[in-house]
Image (spheres, rainbow, N blue to C red):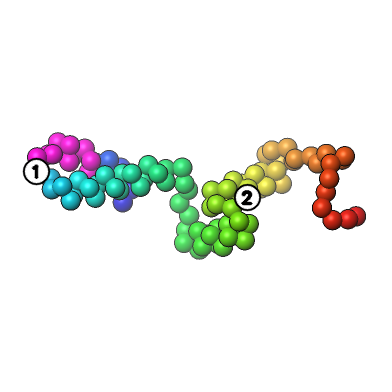
Amino acid sequence: MTIPDTAALLEDAADRIADISRADIQIMLRRAALLLRNSGSIAFDDDVDEALRDLSGEFGKTRNDTVRLIVREWMEKNTYLPVHELDEDGDVDGSA
């Protein structure tokens, strides 16, 4: 169910509050809460979402953190953002 559909259902329920069953109100409120909770999320096609879940697991990050990382790296690579410069005096892992 999309956000406008849920909003329309909630508005209709508010107009007919005496006629709506408690169970229907609970369902609508739970849907609205779910939409609000996930409102910061981006919906992807199933194959992309599955790849994001796999990648998130590999990185040990949340889905949203993985999306942020991917977008930042893409923007840096395509010069929409400046590349993070490493401190030359800082510690690094490995050897050169």
Instruction: Based on the picture, tell me whether residue 11 belongs to the magenta stretch.
Output: yes
Report the side of 33 relative to 16 (left or right): right
Report the side of 73 relative to 53 (left or right): right
Tell me which label, 2 or 1, sits earlier in the chain.
1
Q: Is residue 5 visible?
A: no
Instruction: Estimate the x, y position of residue 21 in percent, counting from the top left.
Output: 13, 48
In the image, the segment drawn in magenta is 9-19
Q: Which mark is residue 70?
A: 2
Q: Main secondary structure of the magenta part?
A: helix
Residue under the point 29% across and 47% down: 30
Q: Depth check: 60 or 1 in front?
A: 60
Q: Is residue 13 visible?
A: yes
Instruction: Estimate the x, y position of residue 75 in percent, counting from the top left.
Output: 66, 43
* Pointer 1 local density, CA inside 10 Å: few below 14, some 14–19, many at least 20: few
Residue under the point 47% across and 46% down: 41
Instruction: Estimate the x, y position of residue 82 in percent, counting from the top left.
Output: 73, 37
Find disc 1 in the rendering and name its residue.
19
Residue under the point 23% across and 41% down: 10
